[in-house]
Image (cartoon, helix red, strand yellow):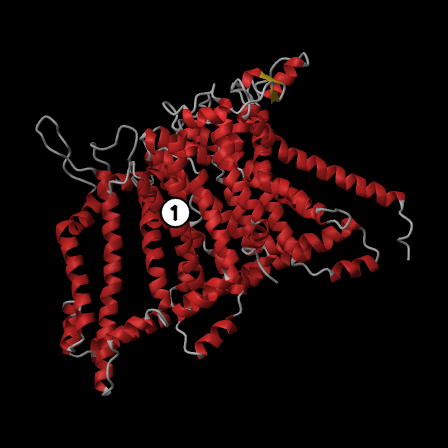
Amino acid sequence: MQEAQTTKVKNAFSERGRKIAAWFKGLPARTKEKFAFAREILNQGNGKVRASMLLMGMGQLLYRQWAKGILYLLVEIAFLAYFILRGADDLLGFFTLGTVESNAWYGIEGDNSVIMMLMGILAWIALLFYAVLYIANIKDCYAIQCAADTLKAPKSFKKELSELLDKKFYKTALALPIVGVSVFSILPIIFMILIAFTNYGGDIVPPALVDWVWLDNFGRILTLGQFAPTFFKIFGWNIIWAVLSTALNYFAGLGLALLLNKKCVKGKTFWRLFPILAYAVPGFITLIAFKYMFSYGGPINQMIVDAGGTAIGFLDIDAKWTARLIGLFANAWLNIPSSMLLATGILSNMNTDLYEAARVDGASAWKQFVKITLPYVLFATMPVLISQFIANFNNFGIFYFLRGGLYMEGYFLASDTDLLINWLYNMSIDNNYYSIGAAISIIIFIVTSVISLAVYVLSPSYKQEETYQ
Amino acid sequence: MKKLKIKPQKLFNVAITYLIILAVCFVFLFPILWLVLASFSKTGSIYSFEGFFPAEFSLDSFKRLFTDTALYNYPRWFLNTLFIALMSSLIGTALTILTAYVMSRFRFRTRKAMMKTTLILGMFPSFMTMTAVYLMMTQFNLINQQWGLILIYSAGAPMGYLTQKGFFDTIPSSIDEAARIDGASNFRIFVRITLPLAAPMIVYTLLSSFVWPWSDFILPQLLLKNKDLYTVAVGLMSLDDSEFSRFAAGSVFIAVPIVVFYFALSKFLISGLSAGAVKQ
């Protein structure tokens, strides 16, 4: 059994290796293929296509494709105006991050490095969009030329518009989402990745000039006395937390689903309402309620006092493990319902013939669970399980609401329940250690992606990747 | 047939099952029950409770919530939250459904690359970008503006298209093809055929993209500095410690609509949640 497992793992890896090798081997040929069309346009394109290369839309206008030509021309003018007015400066500012330091004495308004970087990235993204449109413009003009050469009438503007709702509907539909994601997800992520390589933060915030420091921040986190002990302590706890809470939520959810699925249970929909109730109440409300519940004046301590005991500081500064356990419990309370609903959905799709056969063969209930239910559910939910693991690894809310803003001795701007994500928040939002915070988030990203990739590649779901994607 | 006699062992099994179920339901119900009863507390302070529950009940907390608005303007917060959540939900759902439909039905050159990109982007911790978003919003003049929040929520929504795509994958493409033979364009097929078939998924998406801004705390706290613009979550967090029953009443009031939604839609919830999983 063990051996079979390891060979399976080995096979998965060697298969992957072979694929990567094949990818590299095919690279030159594929690049050539990709540029074949570009070369064809360069060689075969006539003067009008070249006019389009010079100024977007020119070729189309020369071919009397008025509407399209004017549209392309307008795009060109808009981009040129943007780049002349500010884009070009932004692109340059991205590299220098500002050269003029502000000086109130002389009335010099200095450069704001951070804004320069942000706007610089935006300018790069704009340049990318421009390049895409520019190439589309040339390709379009070449297509008109080909049509003209073979004496076919080129597509009318109206027809092209209707194509945008038919064959090319995907372009129309994705335009807005792509712009939105580019500006609000990709741009900030690139910005923060770059910030990790600067000295932005602490004393160095605008109007002071920010500079590139490359890998210094990572070095500081891993070696410097100020950050390193905190980092490793939090990191260790973060791993324990992610594994424990994911396992707890997952198996408790599955168990609950199985329990409610039992044949002898009547009124399944009714019983299911209770977890759904817990699922529906917004998380921050429940967490604050838990915080009140375990506070000194809270009901649990009142009961302890009434019974003759002394109040316990469940979430106090020295309550390391009780606070952690309460966190684990509160997280389970919040997340078991969704895991239960998920398992219920999966189980309802399951083929029950196997159980019949197992029963005939005299397999016990436990054996049926281990040999039939668990492999099936694990297989079906592996992607969800991975995303739950990542969500728990980055579970900000639990300890922010239960025990937020606590700074402890032995920790730098954190407490012993804080996860890396809480530390990141303390560092970059509450105290302005921006570049260190950004470096931490890159470390979080690397850890979570490596773990989830490894789990995914080794999981049976991976072999049926196509059904998932 | 053996079933005529009920074995004592089986009876025991059933009893244990019900016992566990009751215990679990109690654990899930109790904190909520506590909160609800606290919201009807007469004195308003957590310290005047007898054990877990308030000594006297009244509707005062709710009355104060809506009338005593000088310091904590709950009705205002509620309307703010409702506006932001509704708009984000509508725009976000439209973008998500479009993205999911395209990713499920079209095969184009950059499709795989896009799917991988969203997968990778999703692995970055969400707070990482907070500073950047804040700076960007100051540049676009969207601090202290509800539309700024709506923009962020709805622009981020299409990143979570996988569940919806999983659903569209299960609608057989033969239906599309039949319509295409009849000369319908892809847009027409999408509007006339796919959307009606996807009604449950749309409801699920509307709901889940409504709940996020409805109960989010971090972003509004970062972007809304003006007390009149607060959302309920930020407002409730700003309450003084002594205002426990006001907190409870305010919480109950925003939780009720969601709970009703979820109960009514519990069936969609199960299929929606499991749509992201692998199918055999």
Tell me: A189 left or right of A94: right
The answer to whether B7 is drawn above or below residue A466 in the figure is: above
* Residue nearest the viewer, comparing B138 with B183: B183
- State the SS at label 1: helix
Between A442 and B169, the one lying in front of the other is B169
- Residue on which the image places disc 1: B88
The image shows residue A190 at horizontal and vertical percentages of 33, 47
Which quarter of the figure has residue B97?
A: bottom left
Q: Where is residue A204 in the image (x, y as percent from the top left)?
A: 25, 31
Q: Which chain carries label 1?
A: B
User: Residue drawn 22% across and 39% down?
Assistant: A113
Residue A288: % across, % down:
51, 28
Amino acid type, residue under disc 1 in the picture: Ser
Quarter-of-image position of residue B184: bottom left
Q: Which residue occupies the foreground of this view, B252 or B175?
A: B252
Say left or right for A281 vs B130: right
